[in-house]
Amino acid sequence: MSQLPEKMRAVVCHGPQDYRFEQVPTPLPKARELVIKVEGCGICAGDCKCKNGAQMFWGENPWVKPPVVPGHEFYGRIAALGEGAEGKYRIGERVIAEQIVPCWECRYCKSGSYWMCETHNIYGFQKDVAEGGMAEYMRFSENAIVHKIP
């Protein structure tokens, strides 16, 4: 594993209209995980709706689990590898992950329709499970679908 800083800068969503630029701990990779140095992160309509308090994000059973680093459209270079990821990836490789982190256990994932995953963890909306790309670094979980960028 390469040397990561102890702290990083990130946008953190605490709730509707409550987004803050903060110093937070840099994520560390667990087994078979990657940490990337984020090179870019897009902002889409979903991010704007979430920030502005849309019912689909903040309704009766809120989907967003704050405080969380937002951003589900991102790419970067691998900065650290968890144990077991070394054979598949190299430090410095440019990668992108699909925005959903499949559970690989539900009927949709088992049938190959992972984008319909019942758990539906999307980067940038669930604290600790799927922190997003509006930060200097982010972690790709072992369930992530990672693509190398040429």
Image (spheres, grey):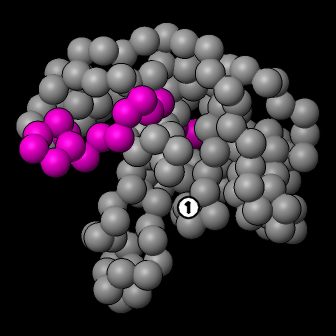
Residue at horizontal 54 percent and vertical 12 percent from the top: 22
In-image side of 88 versus 8 (left or right): right
Question: Is residue 134 in view?
Answer: yes
Magenta span contains residue 132: no
Which x, y percent locates residue 63?
A: 25, 46
For disc 1, the marked residue is: 144
Which x, y percent locates residue 67?
A: 42, 29
49 shown above or below 94: above
Which x, y percent locates residue 26?
A: 70, 30
Magenta span contains residue 63: yes
Which x, y percent locates residue 32?
A: 74, 64
92 shown above or below 50: below
Specify the principal SS of the magenta part.
Answer: loop
Residue at horizontal 52 percent and vertical 33 percent from the top: 133
Residue at horizontal 63 percent and vertical 45 percent from the top: 139
Magenta span of residues:
57-76
Does dot 1 land on a helix, a strand or a loop?
loop
67 shown above or below 100: above
